[in-house]
Amino acid sequence: MKIRLEWYYVPAKTKQSFFMKSDWMSVQQAIMLHDDLEKTGRLKSIEFLDDHDSSWTKKELIKFIKQFETEPHDLVAYIDGGYDVATRQTGIGLAVYFQQNNKKWRVRLNDTFDLIEDNNEAEYAALYRLLRQLEEMDVHHQTIHIYSDSMIVVNQASGEWPCYEEHYSKWLDRIEELASKHGLSLQFELIDRSLNKEADQLATQALEGTKIESVIEKI
């Protein structure tokens, strides 16, 4: 989570206050800046804001830092969707890497969806399933780095391309709703299919009827 500060400052030898704001910074840096400004004795008011424009108190941020190590963080996810034209069935695959309790972990899972119209919608189903998985893991107020080989999903979900397809828009709405609900910032990167083999294999196995869900510690 990134934080910026907004404050009103009263310089020496004047009663006029000036509005100022910082660049984005880490939670720890924001608390340090707050403390330095407070020492001047010239602060009229100050506010912590995250990248969803939600307001935090210093006490809440300190609590967030203490909880951070015991919760999943530094998340990186690979997603893929496979589509069977004959059955209109979709298989999706997710590989999620994260840290928790000073250890590195990997979640691998797949799932199936019915009544999907095309392969691009299958990719959207994979992205939606990722957000549901993060919800189950109680991931919140973080930046999630998402890797996909779908040019359509990466560009539309990141806002680079407009989305005119109604059946894609419905998925986007659900994805944005979940991300907003949990304070998640989604950062997308388009990768070559050869670099997405893990998620692709999981999606293929789902279509073949092999369900997988595992959590392992990475050494």
Image: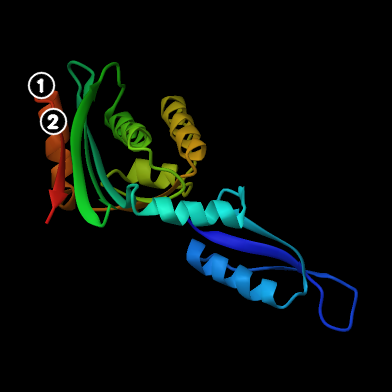
Q: Secondary structure at mark 2?
A: loop
Q: Residues within 10 Å of mark 2 (few under 14, many from 20)?
A: some
Which of 106/162 is in front? 106
Left or right of residue 41, residue 216 in this image: left
Q: How many marks?
A: 2
Which of 6/203 is in front? 6
The residue that label 2 is drawn on is 212
- Image coordinates for residue 5, horizontal then vertical, percent: 63, 63
Q: Secondary structure at mark 1?
A: loop
Say which residue appears at 38% left-offset and 34% top-offset.
135
Say which residue appears at 49% left-offset and 65% top-offset.
28
Would you say residue 64 is visible in this rendering? yes
Say which residue appears at 13% left-offset and 26% top-offset.
211
The residue that label 1 is drawn on is 209
Q: Is residue 27 above or below residue 213?
A: below
Question: Which amino acid is tagged 2?
Answer: Ile
Q: Is residue 105 above or below residue 109?
A: below
- Image coordinates for residue 37, horizontal then vertical, percent: 67, 74
Would you say residue 91 is visible in this rendering? no
Left or right of residue 210, residue 181 in this image: right
Question: Which amino acid is tagged 1?
Answer: Gly
Which of 178/204 is in front? 178
Distance from Cα at disc 2 to Cα at disc 1: 10 Å
Which of 75/41 is in front? 41
Say which residue appears at 10% left-offset and 30% top-offset.
205
